Image (cartoon, coloured by chain):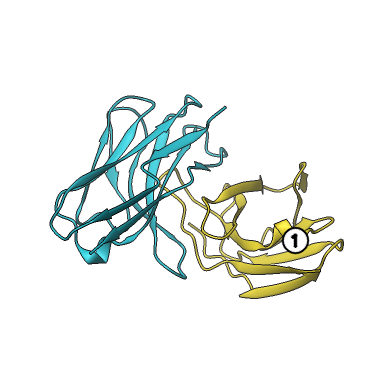
Chain colours: A yellow, B cyan
Amino acid sequence: DAKTTQPTSMDCAEGRAANLPCNHSTISGNEYVYWYRQIHSQGPQYIIHGLKNNETNEMASLIITEDRKSSTLILPHATLRDTAVYYCIAPGGADGLTFGKGTHLIIQP
Amino acid sequence: NAGVTQTPKFQVLKTGQSMTLQCAQDMNHNSMYWYRQDPGMGLRLIYYSASEGTTDKGEVPNGYNVSRLNKREFSLRLESAAPSQTSVYFCASSDAGYSNQPQHFGDGTRLSIL
């Protein structure tokens, strides 16, 4: 797995866009970037993943820089229910995911 | 669609007792995983099964055994429970034969060993 670096915590106002950065400067050409979140000790929830192109689904958007050394997860209209720990992961193979400490996102009312 | 189902949700054991955590998935996934999560930490991989009939050690396999009973089910056994195994255990599955497929997680088993 490529090493990823995320801020420990972030705040965002309810209704605003939450932008969560991730650095993955050692990522190899065929490694995808995945984002998961974990809400208060529930099971991790898959959000989105991408390789080179920007991606969007019903939950979020993923912006990957052209050199692929960093990415940003965007929650377009954050709600209180988006308060969670967000993990950026770049697994190299099929032998499990390496979870770091992630970013604790707190949505403020 | 149930996804990944783990049983039991909670369990308290005494040191030295044994138990098996059950996991089943209904998504026809090839690969299954067991993780543990200790307070304030990320998940750590215990064992995984890339396909039916195969199992491999992860980062923290000591004190555990696994069985891939069939494509749907992957169980985790503690033969002689120790207080250090108090944790939340998560099972996951994926179509990892396709390298860009995400893992889907169950709701966890909260295990306390006294």
The answer to which of B45 and B37 lies nearer the viewer is B37
Position of residue A32 in the picture relative to residue A20 (left or right)? left
Image: A107 above or below A82? below
Position of residue A99 in the picture relative to residue B63 (left or right)? right
Quarter assignment of residue B13: bottom left
The answer to which of B72 and B49 lies nearer the viewer is B72
In percent of width and height, residue A1 lies at 48, 56
Q: Quadrant of the N terminus of chain B?
A: top right
The answer to which of B39 and A35 lies nearer the viewer is B39
Reading the image, the residue beneath label 1 is: A80
Q: Amino acid at mark 1?
A: Leu
Position of residue B72 in the picture relative to residue A50 (left or right)? left
Quarter assignment of residue A69: bottom right
Task: Tally the marks.
Answer: 1
Position of residue B107 in the picture relative to residue B66 (left or right)? right
In percent of width and height, residue A40 lies at 56, 60
Identify the residue at the far right of this view: A15
Q: Is residue B97 visible?
A: yes
Image: A27 above or below B70? below
**At 25% from the left edge and 66% from the top edge, which residue is drawn?**
B84
Image: B9 above or below B84? above
Image: B29 above or below A89? above
The answer to which of A22 and A59 lies nearer the viewer is A59
In percent of width and height, residue A92 lies at 49, 50
Q: Quadrant of the C terminus of chain B?
A: bottom left
Element assignment for label 1: helix
Q: Residues within 10 Å of mark 1 (few under 14, many from 20)?
A: some
**At 78% from the left edge and 44% from the top edge, which residue is drawn?**
A56
Instruction: Check the residue under mark 1 and report the chain it is in.
Output: A
In percent of width and height, residue A9 lies at 65, 74
Q: Is residue B94 visible?
A: no
